[in-house]
Image: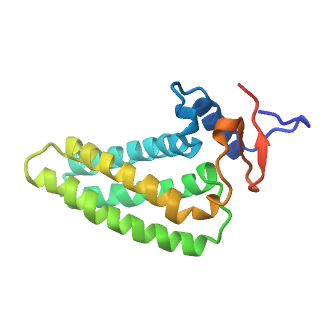
């Protein structure tokens, strides 16, 4: 929690350190393959997915709204939150927000059409329970969104390789620093 000078480290750095420490402990050599940003994405998007499901349930069951509207509103709110949290905590991007936000909007639109409406609302219209349909759509979108965030939207961070398997992690400024083995 504190760096070598005794000052409290930013929460964004502590989040990255936590992800790197967990990844370093993976068995079977997985720590050389799995980047800390994958765990960070799973944590952040797990949280925002629960926000999405909560809003979906509130609007669909509580308010009786149609599936398409409920899926859309929950999706937009959750993905806005996911963008901010991933940019800040997970990818530590300092690239201009405008171009990234535009790329993110395109990725989200593709994701929305393919997985939310195509898979989620499509399965619901075929009689699949709306929560199961959303979970199936969420599984598809997780693979797609992590890939597009890592290799397209936040590609500025690829220039700074994730040295997760060597006991280090990226600093907020992009420099590599040692991580204590917590």
Q: Percent position (x, y) of residue 64?
A: 19, 52
- Image quadrant of residue 61? top left
Q: Taking 1 as reference, is 115 left or right? A: left
Q: Quarter of the image containing the N terminus?
A: top right
Q: Taking 122 as reference, is 106 left or right? A: right
Q: Is residue 110 visible from the viewing direction of this image? A: yes
For the residue pair 63 and 145, the one nearer the viewer reads as 145
For the residue pair 147 and 102, the one nearer the viewer reads as 147
Q: Where 42 sits versus 70, above or below?
A: above
| Residue at the (76%, 56%) spot, across then down | 173
For the residue pair 57 and 35, the one nearer the viewer reads as 35
Q: Percent position (x, y) of residue 40?
A: 55, 43
Q: Where 32 sits versus 64, above or below?
A: above
Q: Percent position (x, y) of residue 53?
A: 33, 45
Which residue is most to the left? 126
| Residue at the (23%, 42%) spot, across then down | 131
Q: Where 121 sits versus 49, above or below?
A: below
Q: Taking 26 as reference, is 51 left or right? A: left
Q: Taking 3 as reference, is 136 left or right? A: left
| Residue at the (19%, 46%) spot, across then down | 130
Q: How many marks?
A: 0
| Residue at the (63%, 64%) spot, across then down | 156
> How is the model colour-coded?
rainbow
Q: Quarter of the image containing the C terminus?
A: top right
Q: Percent position (x, y) of residue 46?
A: 43, 41
Q: Is residue 65 visible from the viewing direction of this image? A: no
């Amino acid at each position: 929690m504190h760096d070598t000078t005794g000052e409290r480290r930013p929460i964004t750095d502590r989040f990255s350190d936590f992800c790197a420490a967990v990844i370093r402990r993976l068995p079977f050599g997985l720590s050389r393959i799995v980047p800390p940003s994958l765990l960070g994405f799973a944590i952040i998007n797990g949280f925002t997915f629960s926000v999405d499901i909560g809003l979906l349930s509130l609007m669909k069951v509580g308010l009786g709204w149609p599936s398409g509207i409920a899926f859309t509103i929950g999706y937009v709110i959750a993905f806005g939150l996911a963008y901010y949290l991933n940019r800040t905590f997970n990818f530590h991007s300092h690239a201009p927000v405008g171009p990234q936000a535009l790329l993110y909007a395109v990725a989200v639109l593709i994701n929305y059409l393919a997985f939310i409406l195509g898979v989620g609302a499509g399965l619901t219209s075929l009689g699949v329970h709306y929560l199961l349909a959303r979970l199936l759509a969420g599984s598809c979108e997780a693979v797609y969104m992590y890939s597009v965030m890592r290799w397209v939207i936040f590609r500025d961070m690829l220039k700074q390789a994730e040295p997760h398997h060597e006991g280090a992690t990226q600093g907020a400024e992009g420099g590599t620093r040692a991580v204590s083995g917590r």
